[in-house]
Amino acid sequence: MFNLANGLGSITRVINPRTLILLVPLLLILAAACSSDSDEVIISSEQESGGPEYAGIIITTDLAVGENRVIFGVIDRDGMPVPGVSSEVGAYLLVPNEETRELKASATARFVAWPTAVGGVFVADVNLDAPGAYEIDVNFTSNVGTAVFAQASFIVNEEPSAPAIGSLAPASVTHTADDAEDISHITSSVEPDLDLYELSVHEALEQDKPLVIVFATPAFCVSATCGPQVGELTKVKESVGDRANYIHIEVFEDPHMIEGQGRSGELVAAVTEWGLPTEPWTFIVDSQGLVQAKFEQFTTADEIEAKLLEIL
């Protein structure tokens, strides 16, 4: 699972490969806020001790040198998300062994409503040219007219864990409906779109078509965004049609055996082959088998379709 101390503090992260589906605190806040039987919120120790009025929480976990899609949220002292139309972001590299920092990127982050129907997050596209510890400054006006300033910390690695933009997509052998005794054996979707289980990834990569892949576990996703993410894939399929292929990969083997047993299942091989530290993930692969776009966490059909149309 993830263990993050965020806001103005540093990030520490511990990943158990068998339970990597647990997500970062803001996602838990967004999910918990939709539940009538949960009053818990997660706030930083600095907020508890009367620190900053607002704190940022980085949701994206796989950040590396180059172009990054950074997703973050802002919470108040009560631990609740603070929405706004957009925010201005500055990404600063913290200079080792010095109390200084260097501005590496500036961007306008757009606000994206979260499918759990509570609050939302900000998304910024930033190009970072050096690895290390970073801090972002966030400035915006909330939807109720309050000036908001927040900070958050994150780590940028030399290389990403998931396939890099421009790299060859792993030719994973993934489950298809034809190979399964029942569709529930290869997806935890309550109402699965059978079109998303026609091809294995390795088969799709042999066709002269772009490919859109979503890794997600609808029934066991702590953030409650995985089912909606698979639904966004269906929307793209219905809009773009057979000019591309579309695949949903359930992250657990035999999901029908997990339900009701209160345990984590074995991860499908593709999760490891694609180096995924979290889920859901969405990838767009071109007709040459090269990764052209990737999205960690929830992504709208409009954003996916816009990137897909760029390579059609």
Image (cartoon, helix red, strand yellow):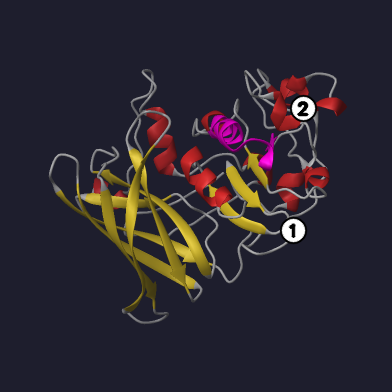
Q: Is residue 300 visible?
A: no
Q: Say which residue appears at 54% left-offset and 50% top-offset.
A: 295
Identified at 21% across, 53% down, the residue is: 140
Q: Quadrant of the N terminus?
A: top right
Residue 294 location (% of width, % of height): 58, 53
Residue 164: x and y in percent read 63, 62
The image position of residue 305, as x and y in percent, is 53, 44
How many residues crowd around disc 2 within 10 Å: few (fewer than 14), some, or many (20 or more)?
Answer: some
Picture quadrant of residue 163:
bottom right
Which numbered disc covers residue 163?
Answer: none
Image position of 100 (left or right of 229): left
Kindly tell me whether residue 135 is visible in this rendering: yes
Main SS, magenta residues: helix
**Foreground residue among 180 and 54:** 180
Residue tagged 1:
288
Q: Does 135 appear above or below 46?
A: below
Report whether 174 appears left or right of 6.
right
Measured as percent of width and height from the top left, residue 125 is found at: 42, 60
Identify the residue under disc 2. Answer: 254
Foreground mark, 1 or 2, reads 1
For numbered disc 2, what is the local secondary structure?
Answer: loop
Amino acid type, mark 2: Asp
Residue situated in front as seen by the camera: 86 or 305: 305
Residue, x 75% and y 28% (percent of image)?
186
Residue type for callout 1: Gln
Disc 1 to disc 2, how far (Cα)? Answer: 31 Å
Q: Residues within 10 Å of mark 1 (few under 14, many from 20)?
A: some
Question: Mark 1 or mark 2, which has the lower sequence index?
Answer: 2
x 55%, y 57%: residue: 62
Report if residue 191 lies within the magenta region. no
Stretch of the chain drawn in magenta: 229-250
Residue 246 is one of the magenta-drawn residues: yes
